[in-house]
Amino acid sequence: MTPPPWCKPVRHTKGGRNRNAGSREEKEAEERRAREEQHQLLLDEQKQKFLDGERITGGMFLEITGRDGFDIHIRTKGTFNRHVRGIDRNGTVSYRKIKGHRTPDFTGCHKAVGDYLAFITDKKGQIIKPGTVTACSMRLLPLPSSDLTTHGSAPLPAET
């Protein structure tokens, strides 16, 4: 009896199946390393876009903060994943409104952005320059040239 045409004959050779197993595992490990390196480059690129003031996705923000070791509350992570389509350095959120559900509260997302910017500023030892946009979308304005203090209340007493 002859085997059906779709059936290929099995050839047994010395060494069995494990002859090329070591090279296959090395190849898979190399592919995994290449994918991970490419993903890290993507995260670096997205982080730079975020710091430059461009919009990135909420999921990408979560990955960047997780990689940098910044913890975000679990419910805020859920809001980022479920509703936030994009976020920028100023805390501006573009979101997806689900029909029949209320508009989500983004205060945790705004706080997370501000705290993350403070975290990386402290981590790098940098000082935010006056006039730059901070996490709260506020600009530091120069003080008027009057006798007011930095709080704007009254002049400082003269030192003796």
Image (tube, rainbow, N blue to C red):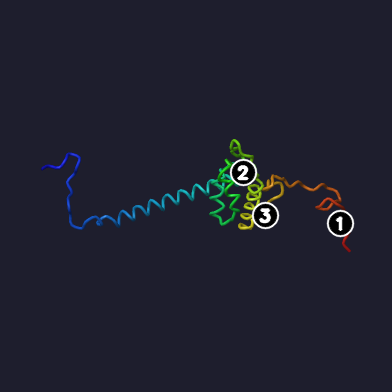
- Tell me the tag on residue 26: none
Disc tally is 3
Q: CA distance from mark 1 to mark 3?
A: 26 Å
Q: Residues within 10 Å of mark 2 (few under 14, many from 20)?
A: many
- Tell me the tag on residue 127: 3
Q: CA distance from mark 2 to mark 1?
A: 39 Å
Dot placed on the residue nearer the N-terminal end, 2 or 1? 2
Secondary structure found at label 3: loop
Residue 10 in the image, given as x and y percentages of width and height: 18, 49
Dot placed on the residue nearer the N-terminal end, 1 or 3? 3
Residue 25 in the image, given as x and y percentages of width and height: 33, 55
- The residue positioned 41% from the left and 51% from the top of the image is 34
Secondary structure found at label 2: loop
- The residue positioned 57% from the left and 52% from the top of the image is 65
Secondary structure found at label 1: loop
Q: Residues within 10 Å of mark 1 (few under 14, many from 20)?
A: few
Residue 7 in the image, given as x and y percentages of width and height: 19, 42
User: Given the image, on which type of amino acid does mark 1 rest?
Assistant: Leu
- The residue positioned 60% from the left and 47% from the top of the image is 51
Frontmost of labels 2 and 1 is: 2
User: 29 or 98: which is nearer to us?
Assistant: 98
Left or right, 138 with respect to 53, comes to right
Residue 119 in the image, given as x and y percentages of width and height: 63, 55
Left or right, 114 with respect to 30, comes to right
Residue pointed to by mark 1: 156
Frontmost of labels 3 and 2 is: 2
Dot placed on the residue nearer the N-terminal end, 3 or 2? 2
Residue pointed to by mark 2: 88
Point out the image quarter for the C terminus: bottom right
User: Given the image, on which type of amino acid does mark 2 rest?
Assistant: Asp
User: Given the image, on which type of amino acid does mark 3 rest?
Assistant: Ile
Check contact, mark 2 vs mark 1: CB within 8 A: no
